[in-house]
Amino acid sequence: MKSGYKKIVLIVVLLWQVLLLTGCDYYLSEQPEKQPAQQVPEPFRNQDSRGRYDTIGKLGTQSISIPAGVIDGWARYMGDPGDFADPKIKAKYQRPPKTYDLPIESFGFQYRISDGDVYTSFRQTEEDYRRDNETLIPYGKPFPWAGVIIYGEYDAAAPLNFNFTVQNEFKLAKEITYFDYIQQEQPLYGLTVYRANNGIDPETGEPWKSDANAKDILLKKDQAGNIKTYIKCEFTHHIDSCSHMFYNDRWHIRVRLGYSRTYLPLWQEMEGNIINILNSWRVSREGKLLGKQIGKA
């Protein structure tokens, strides 16, 4: 009798469990919004000879795959908290899954001016860069590398030119440091040149000996008269360097380079080479490379 009773109880328990499972399945199928979000499948990512994965995303208008070991630091994506954001905000932030459509805000790398190559860790260029640091910079010789930062431009209303930036630069010089930027008669390397107070320090009446307030400004406009290249250079040889920015309409990007003024004559070649590098990193939306990657280890 007891044995029969135990069997009946066991059968009831089993039936109850089946009904529970059935009910759960029905509940989940009827209310999919209550289910955990499906995990987005990882997109295909290219790798280098050491098995390191590329950094992927969309830069301006183009999907790219940046070879591992190239980026100086890390890539920042649109929406990422800033470096000085509240740690609590950083802790809560969840970046969307990385895809070839995730907009890249900015990233940096080292560009070799002499041959258009880029620095890549665990590649010959890493040794070259270290050697140049040790053998050229301490002796004041021109350093053949340019630090590059690329910015994606995503505001459709923002003009891709430096018109306002330059106008504001001239305005502030006049209001704060009390001198004008004077356009020089002769262009330099195809650039229109402006010199602070025509190259003369108003306090001494002699050529500038300090770049604290005054730098040469060199500009290049397109056919519509918009300033597309904007270069500021120190010129006293105490700090002989240039800060060079340009826009590219096709990519919808702004590029900043910093380099020794020795290489200013190559400004146009540098702009072309930077775009060539980016073109070599272009991929289809599925991650298929459209060319041979410059800088791949």
Image: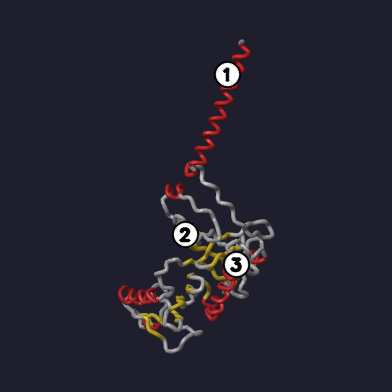
The image position of residue 45, as x and y in percent, is 62, 58
The part of the image, by quadrant, that contains residue 161 is: bottom left
Q: How far apart are marks 1 and 2 (CA)?
A: 61 Å
Residue 281's tag is 3
Tag count: 3
The residue at 42%/89% (across/down) is 185
Residue 9's tag is 1
Disc 1, SS: helix
Q: Using the image, determine if residue 215 lies above or below residue 70.
A: below
Earlier sequence position, callout 1 versus callout 2: 1
Mark 1 crowd level (few <14, some 14–19, many ≥20, 10 Å Cα): few
Q: Going by the picture, which residue comes out furthest to the right? A: 49
Q: Using the image, determine if residue 115 lies above or below residue 81.
A: below
Disc 3, SS: loop
Q: Which of pointers 1 and 2 indicates the residue nearer the eye?
A: 1
The image position of residue 155, as x and y in percent, is 42, 66
Q: Which of 88 and 216 is in front in this view?
A: 88
Q: Going by the picture, which residue comes out furthest to the left? A: 175
The image position of residue 222, as x and y in percent, is 46, 82
Residue beneath label 2, please? 78
Q: Which of 258 and 97 is in front in this view?
A: 97
Earlier sequence position, callout 3 versus callout 2: 2
The residue at 55%/51% (across/down) is 40
Q: Is the residue under label 2 in contact with that under label 1 (CB below 8 Å)?
A: no
